[in-house]
Every structure is written in C-alpha cells, then in structure tokens.
Image (cartoon, rainbow, N blue to C red):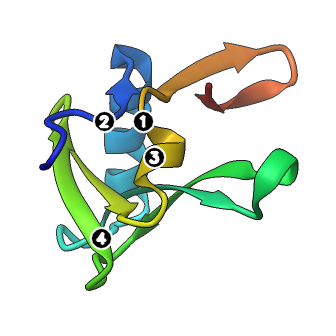
Amino acid sequence: MQVEEPIKITEAAKAAIEDTLRANKIPDSYGLRVGVKGGGCGATLLLGFDEPSSFDQLYQVAGVKVLIDRRHLMYVLGVEVGHQDGPDGSGFTVG
C-alpha cells in the first residue's frame, strides 16, 4: 500500500524548494529526499536533493517531487517540512 502524501510541505517550504532547484540548476530528474540518518534515539531527519534509486518510493506532495527510501518511510510519516527566515538566516525546518 502506498501512502498518498506521507509528509507535509508548507507553502513557504515549497517556494524555497522551487527557488533552490532553479537557482542551483538542479535537473528535473532530481527530487527532495526525506530520510533519516542513524537509528534509535539518535536518529536525525535529513533533507536534500537527489536522484531516485531502486529503494525509493516517489511521491508528489504540494507539487514537489519527494523521494523516500522505503526503509525510512515509517520514520518520516507525518513529518512537516517548513521554511523560516530569522535574524540568523533562513532555512528549512523538519518536524
């Protein structure tokens, strides 16, 4: 069974993702990779741009191509990707 939208992407994050793809001339074959690094209590959520592999599930979330390794899916279900600007700079948020 494939989940329709396993994660959420805010409007601010969508705009920042599109800007990043365009500014860095990232090819259309790439997508936003959402995954985990490490395991147990020390697991960290990761974001990046990557090409799909044979282990990935491919989703369209808020018009963004999202790649999630099948082995990571249960750890990222329900995650919201956001973007915020602050006095120390701007960046993506994952939570």
Vertical side of 74 occupied by 81: above or below: above
**What kind of element bears circle 3?**
helix
Q: Residue at x 42, y 35 (%)?
A: 77
- 5 relative to 26 in the view: left or right: left
Pointer 2 residue: 6
Pointer 4 residue: 56
> For this rendering, which residue is in front, 24 or 45?
45
Q: Residue at x 53, y 56 (%)?
A: 35
**What kind of element bears circle 2?**
loop
Earlier-in-chain disc, 3 versus 4:
4
Residue 93: image quadrant is top right
Pointer 3 residue: 74
Pointer 1 residue: 77
Give the x, y percent position of residue 55.
32, 79
Q: How many marks?
A: 4
Vertical side of 32 occupied by 55: above or below: below
Q: Disc 2 vs disc 1: Cβ atoms closer than 8 Å?
A: yes
Three-letter amino acid code of the residue under disc 1: Leu
Q: Which residue is drawn at 33% across and 30% down?
A: 14
Q: Disc 1 vs disc 3: Cβ atoms closer than 8 Å?
A: yes
Give the x, y percent position of residue 79.
49, 29
> For this rendering, which residue is in front, 54 or 89?
54
Counting other residues with Cα less than 10 Å from the Cα at mark 1, is it few (<14), some (14-19), or many (20 or more)? Answer: few
Three-letter amino acid code of the residue under disc 4: Asp
